[in-house]
Amino acid sequence: MNVLLVLAHPEPASYNGHLARLAVETLTAAGHTVEVSDLYRQRFAAIAGPDDLEPAYAADFFDLQAAQRAAIAAESFEPAISAEMDKLRRADLLILQFPLWWHSVPAILKGWIDRVLAVGFAYGGTKELAGKKALVSLTSGTPNELWDGVTLPTLESTLSHLLRGTFGFCGMEVYEPFMIGSAKHLGPEQRTAADAEFVRMLQELETRKRIF
């Protein structure tokens, strides 16, 4: 299986960075091929706009969807976007690894979604992601048990815009998200246990519950 892991954390030595490396190690050991897009290290631009095309989109009124359709037709996306699209084309499984910020993804990851999952590519045309699998793996400063639908919304509800509104809309098969809570406060034994749970989840991914 070909896997694309997209990491969105500004600190390489962070726990998210550690989990990304652990995922590569685990999946590679299982015989899978893994590509990594480390968005901060790549300095991936987070703002969708006219410069997403080469040459830049020159209409008097900028319409993102119209620009993306034009870029699909002319194969004129700027290289960073084209490279990410090619990684997605090769992938059978997409994994997003990120910290939960304001109940959502970091801005750089939102920019990756806006710019790479373009109309005519991910939806509204060939739907090149249809049938591929998606897994969201994230960390939070809040204990997992508080995402109970009472104290806090459920995790699936919190991530609905991503799980359903993005991946589901693109026709992807979506696994139940995996979260490590209280990530900043884990002691050595707790972190070892969390690592083991993460590895086990990846090793048993085919049997993991799918949202749809």
Image (cartoon, grey):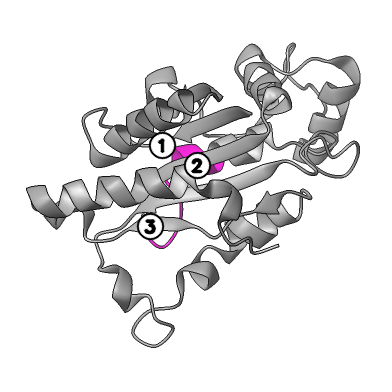
Element on which disc 1 rests: loop
Q: Which residue is mark 3?
A: 179
Magenta segment includes 200: no
Asked if residue 122 can be seen in this view, the reply is yes
Q: Label 1, on which residue?
A: 8
State the image coordinates of residue 212 (x, y, percent, origin top left). Answer: 71, 62
**Farthest-out residue, bottom:** 150
Q: Amino acid at mark 2?
A: Leu
Indicate the position of residue 156 as horizontal and vertical percent values. 53, 68
Indicate the quadrant containing the N terminus: top left, top right, bottom left or bottom right.
top right
User: What type is the residue that disc 1 sits on?
Assistant: Ala
Q: Earlier in the sequence, mark 3 or mark 2?
A: 2
Q: Residue at x 57, y 29 (%)?
A: 4
Closer to us: mark 2 or mark 1?
2
Q: Indicate which disc residue 96 carries.
A: 2
Q: SS for tag 3?
A: strand
Residue 106 in the magenta stretch? The answer is yes
Of residue 14 and residue 112, the one placed in the foreground of this image is 14
**Contact? badges 2 and 1 (CB < 8 Å):** yes
When the figure is inspected, residue 118 is found, relative to residue 42, above or below; the finding is below
Depicted 19 relative to depicted 134: above or below? above
In percent of the image, x 23 and y 36: which residue is there?
14
Q: Is residue 149 above or below residue 123?
A: below
Residue at the image point whose x is 79% and y is 50% from the top: 171
* Whole-number angstrom distance, CA of label 2 to CA of label 1: 8 Å
Q: Residues within 10 Å of mark 3 (few under 14, many from 20)?
A: many
Q: How many marks?
A: 3
